[in-house]
């Protein structure tokens, strides 16, 4: 069982297109958008890492871009460009040093007419950085800097010393080692052709590379231990279902769905954090794809309704109501989706349970869609809230206990009448 593979010319050609195609790093406010070439930006970081004596092992392409380079049109279209720098970070000071290096390269990429002396790191972060993450503990030591793109094609730089879990599913477990390609761009001693091109190695952190590549080309969903993934891989799983992927082992994956949901609700325990995570994920992965966004939310609705076992009934329905509201927003924002308003939540690619649990599917009303705002008021954005003032009461007043009578048979045979007892509500 080999976990590595040497890329052929077609795969190297697709990789070359990814690394040479200019991408936009969009600034906020009056800051200009930067057109950068990925391999030039990465080489600039490598040069500064060498100057700062940061030990580098290798540079890799990860995520959907790597899957696209290996699988071509059989793989989903990539959005982000994820680059992994395997470096040694002994402490958090090393992480701060690397962050400063990225900001210096970003500063050098600004146009010449920009007054760079007055730009601080905080200013650059607010203008061009979409997300920054730093994890430093016994099992994980890595940092992430995601550069903003208004079209959702973010340029993500991840600096990794150690990471316990590096993939969610087998189809996104590929890592392409870029050292030979980056050296080729620096030297430019020859032009690539079918007979002469750099030797590029790809690995699968899932394990067997041939199996993972087969899963990608045949659009199969395979994973293991989803409880180790942040968020359980639940959103990625629903995204794969929407894009035509199907479970390799349906019965086994139904069991894994429960672990996905359990880990998701551990990491995002309240509806407000779930709302923020969903909004962020949809904004990153479904820009201009309202049909896919709608099917994603419908699929997520059904997976949570059918496979959640770790929540109380009212907690589950709070989450479902929140997703229901997001679905209504998609319907209301796109007139072409109006004829689909009353369709079932389960898309064609989703394989339903043989016997769905009762009361888990949405009941559609034969009237225009109106989200139920009153149940969602605590978790909606501020501008969408409608303030409802409760009747004036004395806050020191104790709630009055009410009693209702409930008939409880004390025995099936002892008495022919029922004994009435008060039940405190």
Image: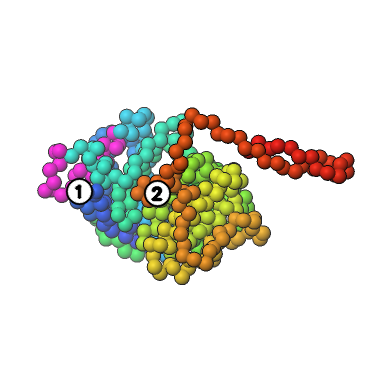
Q: Position of residue 400 (x, y in %)?
A: 58, 34
Query: Residue at the spot x=48%, y=44% of the render?
Result: 271
State which tag comes first along the sequence, 2 or 1. Answer: 1
Q: From the image, which quarter does the C terminus lie in?
A: top right
Residue at numbered disc 1: 31
**Residue 149 against residue 93 in the figure, above or below:** below
Circle 1 crowding by C-alpha within 10 Å: few under 14, some 14–19, many from 20: few
Q: Position of residue 4 (x, y in %)?
A: 47, 51
Cα–Cα gap, marks 2 and 1 = 35 Å
Query: On the rendered structure, is 385 left or right of 232?
Result: left
Query: Residue at the spot x=48%, y=68% of the render?
Result: 340
**Residue 142 against residue 22 in the figure, above or below:** above
Query: On the rendered structure, is 354 left or right of 240?
Result: right
Q: Quadrant of residue 129?
A: top left
Q: Secondary structure at mark 1?
A: loop
Tell me if residue 4 is in the magenta stretch: no
Residue 383 in view: yes
Query: On the rendered structure, is 13 left or right of 234?
Result: left
Q: Position of residue 145 (x, y in %)?
A: 33, 43
Residue at numbered disc 2: 386
Residue 11 in view: no
Q: Position of residue 144 (x, y in %)?
A: 36, 41
Q: Secondary structure at mark 2?
A: loop
Query: Residue at the spot x=52%, y=43% of the render?
Result: 265
Q: Quadrant of residue 334?
A: bottom left
Circle 2 crowding by C-alpha within 10 Å: few under 14, some 14–19, many from 20: few
Residue interval drawn in magenta: 97-118
């Amino acid at each position: 069982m080999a976990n590595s593979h040497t890329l052929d010319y077609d795969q190297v050609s697709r990789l070359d297109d990814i690394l040479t195609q200019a991408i936009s790093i969009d600034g906020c406010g009056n800051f200009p958008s930067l057109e950068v070439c990925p391999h030039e930006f990465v080489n600039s970081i490598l040069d500064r890492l060498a100057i700062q004596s940061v030990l580098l092992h290798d540079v890799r392409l990860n995520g959907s871009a790597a899957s696209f380079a290996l699988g071509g049109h059989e793989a989903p279209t990539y959005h982000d460009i994820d680059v992994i720098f395997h470096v040694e970070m002994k402490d958090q000071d090393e992480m701060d040093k690397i962050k400063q290096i990225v900001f210096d390269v970003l500063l050098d990429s600004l146009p010449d007419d920009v007054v760079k002396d007055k730009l601080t790191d905080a200013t650059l972060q607010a203008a061009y950085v979409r997300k920054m993450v730093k994890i430093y503990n016994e099992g994980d030591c890595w940092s992430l800097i995601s550069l903003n793109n208004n079209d959702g094609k973010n340029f993500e730089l991840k600096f990794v010393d150690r990471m316990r879990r590096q993939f969610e599913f087998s189809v996104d477990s590929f890592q392409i080692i870029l050292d030979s390609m980056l050296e080729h761009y620096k030297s430019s001693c020859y032009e690539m052709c079918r007979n002469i091109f750099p030797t590029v190695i790809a690995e699968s952190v899932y394990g067997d590379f041939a199996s993972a590549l087969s899963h990608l080309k045949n659009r199969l969903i395979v994973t293991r231990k989803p409880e180790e993934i942040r968020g359980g891989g639940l959103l990625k799983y629903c995204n794969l279902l929407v894009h035509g992927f199907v479970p390799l082992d349906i019965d086994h994956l139904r069991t894994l769905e429960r672990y996905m949901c359990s880990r998701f609700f551990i990491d995002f325990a309240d509806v407000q954090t779930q709302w923020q995570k969903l909004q962020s994920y949809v904004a990153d992965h479904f820009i201009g794809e309202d049909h896919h966004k709608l099917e994603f939310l419908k699929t997520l609705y059904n997976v949570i309704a059918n496979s959640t076992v770790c929540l109380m009934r009212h907690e589950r329905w709070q989450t479902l109501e929140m997703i229901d509201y997001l679905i209504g927003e998609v319907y209301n924002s796109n007139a072409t989706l109006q004829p689909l308003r009353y369709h079932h939540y389960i898309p064609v690619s989703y394989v339903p349970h043989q016997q769905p649990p009762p009361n888990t599917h949405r009941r559609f009303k034969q009237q225009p869609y109106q989200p139920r705002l009153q149940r969602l008021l605590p978790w909606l954005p501020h501008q969408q809230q409608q303030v409802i003032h409760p009747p004036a009461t004395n806050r020191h007043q104790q709630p009055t206990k009410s009693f209702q009578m409930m008939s409880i048979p004390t025995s099936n045979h002892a008495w022919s009448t029922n004994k009435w007892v008060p039940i405190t509500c």
